[in-house]
Image (spheres, rainbow, N blue to C red):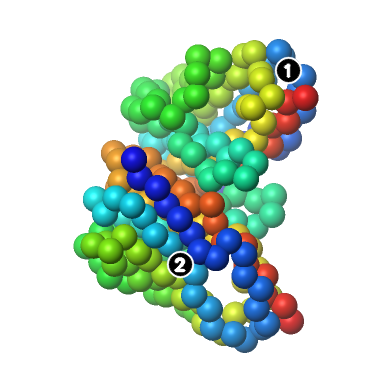
Amino acid sequence: EAGVTQFPSHSVIEKGQTVTLRCDPISGHDNLYWYRRVMGKEIKFLLHFVKESKQDESGMPNNRFLAERTGGTYSTLKVQPAELEDSGVYFCASSRQLASTDTQYFGPGTRLTVL
Amino acid sequence: KQEVTQIPAALSVPEGENLVLNCSFTDSAIYNLQWFRQDPGKGLTSLLLIQSSQREQTSGRLNASLDKSSGRSTLYIAASQPGDSATYLCAVTSGYSTLTFGKGTMLLVSP
């Protein structure tokens, strides 16, 4: 069974540019999550999809971040325009059941650097 | 607001030692607690998941305990090996579906 994949693995952009991160969850996992780790801080939750619906987006930092999961398969996270403080590692995770009962499987992350 | 603290932040031990990593959380109303391992440049790998009704879970040389009322968990690693070197993360599920993480403990096991 293929794991969670993320693309790209690294992205370096300038302030004000746009970047789109992609996550492919494990096949059959309805739940998809985005997390972020900025330097020196803990991993923090951004949002949660159940199929194509946003279940919880309480962790999204501001309206420069837009997440989509059209068709309930892969998801994209767009940052527009990027700011310096958006630098960090963005993780995607998926699970078959909700986190209250099931393990989340994490991808390798996308390291975003905003210059 | 749930907060998770991990102690120590870093730990260096010689091969063969038994060791304990600590995790504490501020809100005892949790669904479960998980221990993850992260290798450099890699994603997180779930090691153990303890449901709130459980006291401990074991997998090989790893044993995790949970004391929900006091807001504490420990991860015990027996007979440590250089391959155990990684960052260990503790996370609790206290909301509908989200994990709250600690900053992690960076473990180095030297041969």
What chain is tagged by disc 1?
A
Q: Tell which subunit mark 2 falls on.
A: B
Camera-side residue of A63 and B59: A63
Relative to B5, A15 lies left or right? right
**Mark 2 belongs to which amino acid?**
Asn
Crowd band around label 2 with a 10 angstrom C-alpha radius: few (<14), some (14–19), many (20+): some
Q: Is residue B36 visible in this depiction of the protein?
A: no
User: Picture quarter containing residue B72?
Assistant: bottom left
Q: Is residue B20 left or right of residue B10?
A: left
Please indicate, yes or no, whether residue A21 appears anywhere in the rendered image: yes
Q: Name the residue at 51% across, 64% down.
A: B7
Residue matched to label 2: B22
Asked whether, in this view, residue A79 is left or right of residue A56, the answer is right
- Residue B107 percent across, percent down from the top left: 62, 67
Question: Looking at the rendering, in which quadrant would you find the C terminus of chain A?
Answer: top right
Q: Position of residue A9 (x, y in %)?
A: 70, 37
Q: Secondary structure at mark 2?
A: strand
Judging by the rendered image, the residue that carries numbered circle 1 is A15
Residue drawn at x 31%, y 55% is B32
Q: CA distance from mark 1 to mark 2?
A: 39 Å
Q: At x 66% / y 73%, what residue is drawn?
A: B12
Under tag 1, what secondary structure?
loop
User: Is residue A18 shown above or below A11?
Assistant: above
- Discs 1 and 2 lie in a common subunit: no
For the residue marked with disc 1, what is the amino acid? Lys
Q: Position of residue A110 (x, y in %)?
A: 65, 36
Residue B85 pos. (x, y %):
65, 68
Vertical placement of A99 versus A71: above or below? below
